[in-house]
């Protein structure tokens, strides 16, 4: 029997995490506005409060930089609960922000909210956000693909949103664990250290922030100096889907030149991404742009090209079979790292746990290929995890236990999206 989600409780999580037009991922652990969290959260708000959904996205782009970057954190109000705060980033933006980005779900969220909107001002609000999303896609193409390969790069593991994925292990090991800024971790005061990245990871995370801050957050200087540069699948696949959603919005709000610009990026990125397919592994793999080598890893990000309609029908079926194989090895899917990989850790953040947002995107992708049974199985599993464990940040695929922060906004948003 499929368990039912308590949608009233899911709405209450968003309401409780509302800080005045923006939603914190969860109190204490993440006390500001996070970029991709907010995009999913806006879709959740759209299921019951259209005004609030628009506000979420508008508050996010208050942090947008003049060059188009939408930062991964907007520090709307001070808090001592999180490290690294605005002083460490030193970006001098108002409102204060971090200096890197995150998976660009924004255009997809704008399209979703607009598609469900009934308000008289919906077109005006969507139009403003269309221009913000367009500027952010241009930023990705210019700042993070200056050589014009079609694939954009992350310069920090935090940009992938999948901070400690084994996908970064080799490339990240080249980053010196020598920060100049004193590390004052706050995350492990809120959740158990066994569920979080290691101290050594933090030394490297902050070393990168130190390099970028000292380069004055200039995009071309960052590209020049970054010792970590990876063409990640989550970023590229989510951006590709976002470009498609932006193209839909451009039909209504864009100029002919903008439509042509967007479709040129879509075509170029599709060609570049197709080279990252691994027939042997049954998914896509990221590219280390410093060594030039394909990273031989199997993570759930490798299935996200489904969400952008990139694979052929045969490749989509191959991915569906691989997902079924993973799910056969553990009790719940989709684990963030293959459970057949020796680096799989079922409780440690992005090294194994199941994440609702990733399941949502994979299931949407599978459904678009009419792999309905596989999509429904993932959705039912996700609903079951949430209804039995509550709105946890993520879940142990071997036991189903809810882990990380509790009362988590994006898990509540996914619960609302899966209950429609
Ligand atoms: C964190 O602090 O855990 C975040 O993922 C970085 O944005």
Image (cartoon, helix red, strand yellow):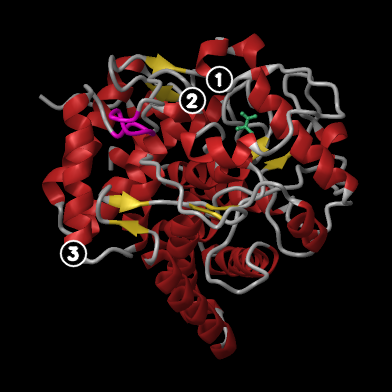
Q: Residues within 10 Å of mark 2 (few under 14, many from 20)?
A: many
Residue that mark 2 sits on: 349
Direction from residue 93 to residue 330 in the image, left or right: left
Which secondary structure is most common in the magenta stretch?
Answer: loop
Q: Position of residue 249 (x, y in %)?
A: 48, 72
Residues under numbered marks 1 and 2 in contact, where contact means CB atoms less than 8 Å apart? yes
Residue that mark 1 sits on: 196
Q: Residue at x 76, y 47 (%)?
A: 99
Direction from residue 66 to residue 335 in the image, left or right: left
Q: Residue at x 54, y 29 (%)?
A: 15
Count of numbered badges drawn on the protein: 3
Is disc 1's CB within 8 Å of ligand 1? Answer: yes
Q: CA distance from mark 3 to mark 1?
A: 37 Å
Q: Residue at x 40, y 45 (%)?
A: 296
Label 1 secondary element: loop
Q: Of callouts 3 and 1, which one flags the residue occurring earlier in the amino acid sequence? A: 1
Residues under numbered marks 3 and 1 in contact, where contact means CB atoms less than 8 Å apart? no
Q: Residues within 10 Å of mark 3 (few under 14, many from 20)?
A: few
Q: CA distance from mark 1 to mark 2?
A: 6 Å
Direction from residue 395 to residue 323 in the image, left or right: left
Q: Residue at x 73, y 28 (%)?
A: 177
Residue that mark 3 sits on: 313
- Highlighted range, magenta: 334-341
Label 2 secondary element: helix
Is disc 2's CB within 8 Å of ligand 1? Answer: yes
């Amino acid at each position: 029997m499929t368990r039912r989600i308590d949608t009233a409780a899911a709405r209450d999580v968003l309401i409780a995490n509302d800080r005045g037009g923006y939603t914190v991922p969860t109190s204490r652990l993440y006390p500001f506005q996070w970029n991709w969290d907010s995009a999913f959260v806006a879709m959740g708000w759209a299921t019951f409060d259209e005004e609030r959904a628009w506000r979420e996205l508008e508050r996010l782009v208050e942090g947008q930089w003049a060059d188009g970057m939408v930062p991964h954190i907007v520090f709307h109000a001070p808090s001592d609960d999180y490290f690294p705060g605005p002083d460490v980033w030193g970006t001098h933006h108002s409102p204060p922000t971090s200096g890197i980005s995150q998976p660009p779900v924004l255009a997809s969220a704008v399209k979703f909210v607009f598609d469900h909107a009934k308000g008289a001002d919906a077109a005006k609000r969507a139009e403003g956000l269309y221009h913000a999303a367009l500027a952010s896609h241009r930023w990705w193409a210019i700042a993070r693909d200056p050589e014009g390969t079609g694939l954009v790069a992350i310069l920090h593991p935090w940009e992938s949103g999948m901070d400690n994925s084994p996908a970064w292990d080799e490339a990240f090991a080249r980053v010196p664990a020598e920060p100049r800024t004193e590390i004052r971790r706050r995350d492990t005061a809120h959740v158990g250290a066994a569920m979080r990245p290691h101290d050594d990871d933090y030394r490297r995370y902050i070393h990168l922030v130190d390099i970028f801050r000292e380069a004055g957050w200039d995009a071309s200087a960052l590209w020049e100096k970054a010792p970590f540069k990876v063409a990640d699948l989550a970023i590229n696949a989510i951006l590709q889907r976002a470009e498609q959603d932006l193209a839909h919005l451009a039909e209504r709000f864009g100029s002919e030149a903008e439509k042509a610009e967007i479709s040129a990026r879509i075509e170029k990125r599709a060609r570049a991404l197709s080279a990252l397919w691994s027939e042997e592994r049954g998914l896509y793999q990221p590219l280390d742009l410093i060594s030039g080598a394909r990273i031989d890893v199997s993570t759930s990000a490798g299935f996200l090209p489904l969400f952008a309609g990139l694979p052929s029908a045969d490749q989509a079926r191959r991915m569906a079979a691989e997902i079924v194989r993973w799910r056969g090895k553990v009790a719940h899917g989709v684990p963030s790292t293959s459970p057949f990989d020796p680096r799989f850790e079922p409780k440690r953040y992005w090294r194994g746990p199941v994440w609702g947002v990733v399941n949502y995107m994979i299931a949407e992708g599978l459904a678009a290929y009419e792999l309905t049974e596989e999509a429904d199985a993932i959705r039912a599993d996700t609903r079951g995890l949430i209804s039995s464990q509550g709105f946890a940040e993520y879940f142990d695929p071997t036991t189903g236990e809810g882990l990380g922060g509790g009362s988590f906004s994006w898990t509540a948003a996914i619960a609302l999206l899966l209950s429609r």
